[in-house]
Amino acid sequence: MWCCRPAFQLHRGVGREEVMSSTLVETVSINYEDFNESFLTCGTCLSLIWTGSFDGGEHTPKLLHCSHTVCLHCLTRIVASHARDDGTFRCPICRESIRIPSGGVAALPPSFLVNQLLDLMSRQRREVVPKCSTHANQELLFCESCDLVFCTQCSNGSHQGSAASYQHTVIPLSIAIKRMSEILCYKANECYSKLNEASDAVTSEMHQLDHAVDSTFEDVNRAFQAIIDTIEQRREAVISNVKKMRDEKKKVLQDQLDIIEGERRKVQQECEGLQYQVEVRNITKKIAHLNTKIDSLSTLVEPRENAFLKFESQHNEAFDQIQATIEDYGRVVTSKTFPSLSFMKAKKAMTHLRSEVVVHTVDYDGESQCTGGDPVEAEVKSEGGDVVENQIEDNEDGSYSVFFTPEQGGTHSIAVKIFGRSIKESPLHVEVIDEHNPDIVYGTRGSGKDQFLQPVGICIDDNEFMYVADTGNSRIKVLSPQLKEVQHIVGDALEGRSVTGITRTPSSSLVFVNWRKKTITEVTSSGQLLSQFTHEQLIEPTTLAVNSDGEILVADNAVNSVFVFLPGGKLVRKWGVKGSKPGQLGSIAALCTGPDNEVIVADSRIQVFSPEGQYSRTIFETKGKGPKGTYGGLFLDPKGFLLATRQERNNSRIQVFDYTLGTLIFTIDSREAKLKRPSGLATTRDGHVVIVDLGNDCVKKFRYM
């Protein structure tokens, strides 16, 4: 054995010749017996090399994952008597659990280091220090920095470095060879271990494939047996029908036979003794009677039922349909997805909002998959380790969306597995933002271009152009989907700074209400007047909505009622009574309609009424005796989310409800969203809500799902 420290250190100074310093390389004599006992003895059976223990046969040295070496003979004995049910055994030296490879303990990697030591000791000679071929008395040196072999005389007392001020690490070549041999053995052992892991993984996958095939066979047999059973049931039903028809026909014919037999007996009785009859009159009378009977028996001559009965299977298209269905029935689904190359990307995540992570699948060659159906599993955890509920949607294009709604800010981890194997970069860490900043803010206070003065209402058309009731400026501002000004709609109907409600009709026209003039006006999207009406019962109309039938619903706060008009202005019905009990109305702030034309009304509460005004349910109501707060806007989006803006004494908020269940899903506080006094609102197709901020005289666009 060689014991060493770095033999040479080379320091290079700028502008002067390099100088080499050296230390002696010492050789140490090792006692072979001590060496054998310390390094070449099996820790279990204490067999030594000199007794033929590590001889390449049953006592072959095997390296365990805990880095201890035990002979094959001992390992075989230990596994035979102490192996666990989970396929592991304990190292006899350190007691660490060791997994048994699929090929048994014989498949464990050999101890390369022990084998090398055995080879060294078998030669029973000391290692020869490599000498320079030119200078026989000089030991060869090795520079780790330059990867160069030399001796001190070959370098003439100097060693060329690669750059000024470059420090070289020089060691004896014999030490370098040993060190690199050890590294080589270590790396070989690592490769062997990795190959074992790969072999185990592939073998396990093959076993799972066999199980999957067996399970699929069972599913196929079960599915087709169900079809066979159905066909057999139909066959038995048809046969039963044949028997039933046979019995019915047979009964009719048997009844006819019974009648014929009865008539035959009557004739026989009447004819008995006629050969002894001598009274002509009696004979004549019998003949006449028999003539009459013969005429009546003509109906019995022909069978009252027939023997026609046959099976048809071509009377309709049922057979062709069955054949086509059977040919297309069932399919075997598989996948070429390779989990460790598949990846995921996170979209912007915010508290209380539905956040999304998209998983993209690829095959072994890195080609994107274009079909779905993979068994994808996901687990989402908050920064505190709490599990967050998630839903996985198959986009059927090779990608999958993992949706979750975080309740807390901070880093969330999303772990995704396919076939039970983790995908690339799983778990992915996503930063959830706790502030709901708007994506776009448009407008400032004023009367010019890109300015508002007391905006209160908004609606969006099918092309996502926005129409904002700019009340203080007596106009309607038209904005593009990107919140760019397109035009202004003005006119007499908008004068008086008193337009407080605006909505769209099923025919895509605009309807707005002027509470001072008590008029309801309909215009085209470009501002051309279509119709205008009022009604003597209207006192303070403030907001309105249009249902799917085109009826215009107008809320009047002076009488706490809802008026329902036809498009021309004819009053159809009026309902509502002032009060705070369920079904009664306070100061109505917002109005919208549901999918079945039910009416959703907001004062300090949110209540639902039938189209005729019958109270149905209350979605939200503040309990207690404190300030109730008021609503500014209502909107029911196509996905069934009811959005509402609400103002309270010291705070404003956006509420999002599940309309069907009537439950509050989440709230966006004004301090998070920087809203001062939110009023009208509407949603876009891409999951954004556009809100009129009356307190800041602007329009803000937020993502809400």
Image (cartoon, grey):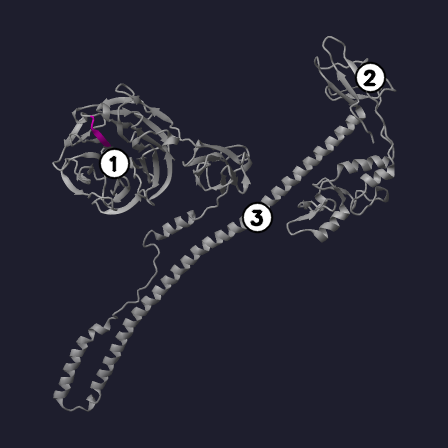
Q: Crowdedness of circle 3 by 10 Å Cα count: few (<14), some, many (20+)?
A: few
Q: Nearer the viewer, mark 1 or mark 3?
A: 1
Residue denoted by label 3: 210
Camera-nearest residue between 50 and 428: 428
Mark 3 or mark 2, earlier in chain: 2
Kindly tell me whether residue 343 is visible in this rendering. no
For the view shown, which residue lies furthest in the top direction? 15
Residue located at (85% from left, 28% from top): 27
Residue denoted by label 2: 152
Kindly state the secondary structure of the residue where label 3 is placed.
Answer: helix
Mark 3 and mark 1 in contact (Cβ < 8 Å)? no
Instruction: Say if 521 sits above or below 661 in the image.
Output: above
Kindly tell me whether residue 559 is visible in this rendering. yes
Distance CA(mark 1)–CA(mark 2): 97 Å
Residue 302's x, y, as percent?
Answer: 24, 71
Camera-nearest residue between 346 and 463: 346
Residue 455's x, y, as percent?
Answer: 27, 27
In screen coordinates, is 595 left or right of 20?
left
What amino acid is labelled 1 in the image?
Ala
Please give the label number shown on residue 589: 1
Distance CA(mark 1)–CA(mark 3): 66 Å
Residue located at (71% from left, 14% from top): 165
What amino acid is labelled 3 in the image?
Asp
- What span is colored magenta in the figure? 497-502
Magenta-span inclusion, residue 500: yes
What amino acid is labelled 2 in the image?
Thr
Kindly state the secondary structure of the residue where label 1 is placed.
Answer: loop
